[in-house]
Amino acid sequence: MLSLAATLAEPQHFSLAEKLLLIVLTAASAAAFWRRFGAVLDKIRQSKKDPGFHLFPLGRRVWDFFWEVLCQAKVIRQRPLPGLAHAFVFWGFCAFALVTLNHFASGIGVGFLSPSGPFGRFYFYLAAAFAFTCAAGIFGLFVRRFFIRPKWLGQKLSWESGFIALLIFVLMATYLAAFFVADASPATRILWWTHTLAILIFLPIIPHTKHLHLLLSPATVFLSRGGFSQIPPLVGDEDFGLVAGTDLTQLVSLQAYSCVECGRCTEHCPAANTGKLLNPKEIVLGVRAYLNDLGPASDQSLLGKYNAQEAVFQCTTCGACEFQCPVGIEHLPILIGLRRGAVNTGAWEDDYGAKLFLALERGSNALGISPSERDKFIQKQALALFDGTQEYCLWLGCMGGYDPKGREIVADFARVMNYLGTSYGVLRKEKCTGDPVRRLGNDLLFQQLAEANLEILAQSKVKKIVTICPHCVRTIQEDWKDYGTPPPIEHHSEFLARFADKLPKQITDETIVYHDPCYLGRYRNVFDEPRAVTALAGTVVEAPRNHERSFCCGAGGGLTFLGEETGERVSHVRAAELVATGATTVGTACPFCNSMFRDALAESGEAAPQLLDIAQLTARGLPKNEAV
Ligand code: SF4
Ligand code: SF4
């Protein structure tokens, strides 16, 4: 045990030869470090400036840095045990910064912390506590990587990681052991030099390996774009997205070099989990390999050798990767940037994609149905047209206006609005928000749809919008901002939750498993409202993956309009998880999720739960004579 009488032992004297050796070894280690680190910084600096990037306001950045970097909050929250082990190592490194400076200073005779002085004594004890937890943490991470071996870390054992773990362990062990020896003992000198050599070997390894994240990830977190899945604007006629190295921006390059290869993104990716080619970790590493081999001035394609086009178009844009990444890597601007590059240069050839683009150009809805069918639905349901006097514009979206089940959801939501006495109307000329083309990278078409809709809304004097579709909410509120100022919009779950005390509470023995749609949960941070509404209709139960960790339905990113998936169907995997909860009903809050689960649940046999949107669950409790 470390007794309070013990002090950190240090050699009392270093010979001239020792001092010279220390200086030469330190210079060699620093040179080897800089050779690689300087080259990495050059590649980041030489990359294109990020359009639309603003450093200010700083408040959010400082908070993210404090919370995610210094407190390691996200790392611990998302994977408590390994996260805590990682945090112990990180905090150990922070505590050792001063100890290490003093260590080298004492080697050349200018040490500034004395083990016998009050501050030095206190600080060395504090560092000893951190050394102990750091050693325990690195041992835990070593056991996990080499014996538990989660598949997300990759099939191949990383001996480099093993060696780094050993060095960190040696650093901590030699520091702690120095409390148990006397200054004059030969063991003190051996411990001192072993500690020194471990640091000098460790230093150049950092920039040559994924441990580069130790230096870069604090900057990556601090400089993030802010907000989820922020798609940067294209600038000028020559900007087609991420086509070649010359299109890589400084943030993308910084992020590519910050990846710690932990595999959290891949662990949560619906595509990677269902046998697709897409692996978000490999996408980031593909960009890094490109930068290493060709650099940011290259005009060679980013897709091909380094990242497969097929993989990029398998992304549902669910955002699980970006949400999970502990070092602030923003996958969606990269994935959508690569799609933009392929679509805007005509390199992406896909029959379903071409059909979707054509449908949106001609009929302005993604389902390719004549707009007159939407008019018939509006008439049949006697939905009022928006005339500027109503409080809300009820935005139907493609699913609410054309999909049979989506129309049922709209009809039931309209019943609830009637019951609440809210005035609303629908737009006759509403077009697709452009969500699928925005995510697929067709910027020209997206711009046309966004501008046309913004004009219609302005002409109609719409002040507030409510809709059943989280994709419409996201696209109108965030993506349209590139082309104008949309009116405020809310999702029907938020609207309904606000009126929860005015809506009937149903007495049932029904259990309802609520599925968090990606575009409402991770994208909008709305988790409680749909649950509050669902609770009016029965007992809410949770799927194993819920809230921020919810598993995608497979529809997003325009994929619902593309061809058959390879591997297992994402919707089937999620539906099986929902069925396994034993709930009698699956509750949804997105017409895309609803459409994906429709087929998936039908295949789960007689015991399949019923599938209802929260608007339908709510409308079910209204008095029977409530008119539409
Ligand atoms: S957004 Fe979702 S589907 Fe796309 S790579 Fe990330 S986790 Fe996978
Ligand atoms: S991108 Fe982020 S989550 Fe994925 S492996 Fe790299 S560091 Fe981990």
Image (cartoon, rainbow, N blue to C red):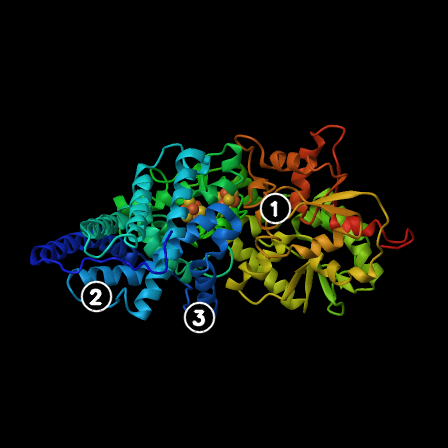
**For residue 202, side relative to residue 425 (left or right):** left
Furthest-left residue in this view = 17
Where is residue 286 drawn, in percent x and y? Answer: 36, 42
* Other-residue count near label 1 (Cα within 10 Å), few / some / many at <14 / 14–19 / ≥20: many
At 60% from the left and 63% from the top, the residue drawn is: 454
Report how far apart the C-alphas of labels 1 and 2 lie in the structure: 70 Å
Q: Amino acid at mark 3?
A: Leu
**For residue 619, side relative to residue 231 (left or right):** right
3 or 2: mark nearer the eye: 2
Q: Nearer the viewer, residue 75 or 171?
A: 171
At 56% from the left and 31% from the top, the residue drawn is: 568
Q: Are marks 1 and 3 in contact (CB under 8 Å)?
A: no
> Helix, strand, or loop for circle 1?
loop
Q: Nearer the viewer, residue 448 or 271?
A: 271
**First along the sequence among labels 1 and 3:** 3
Report how far apart the C-alphas of labels 3 and 2 lie in the structure: 37 Å
Which residue lies under the disc numbered 3? Answer: 58
Where is residue 237 drawn, in percent x and y? Answer: 39, 58
Which residue lies under the disc numbered 1? Answer: 366
Decide: is 230 above or below 464. Answer: above
Report how far apart the C-alphas of labels 1 and 3 lie in the structure: 40 Å
Q: Are marks 1 and 2 in contact (CB under 8 Å)?
A: no
Residue 125, by quadrant, is: bottom left
Which residue lies under the disc numbered 2? Answer: 111
**For residue 549, side relative to residue 325 (left or right):** right
> Helix, strand, or loop for circle 3?
loop
Q: Amino acid at mark 2?
A: Gly
Mark count: 3
Q: Nearer the viewer, residue 337 or 506?
A: 506
Mark 1 CB within 8 Å of ligand 1: no
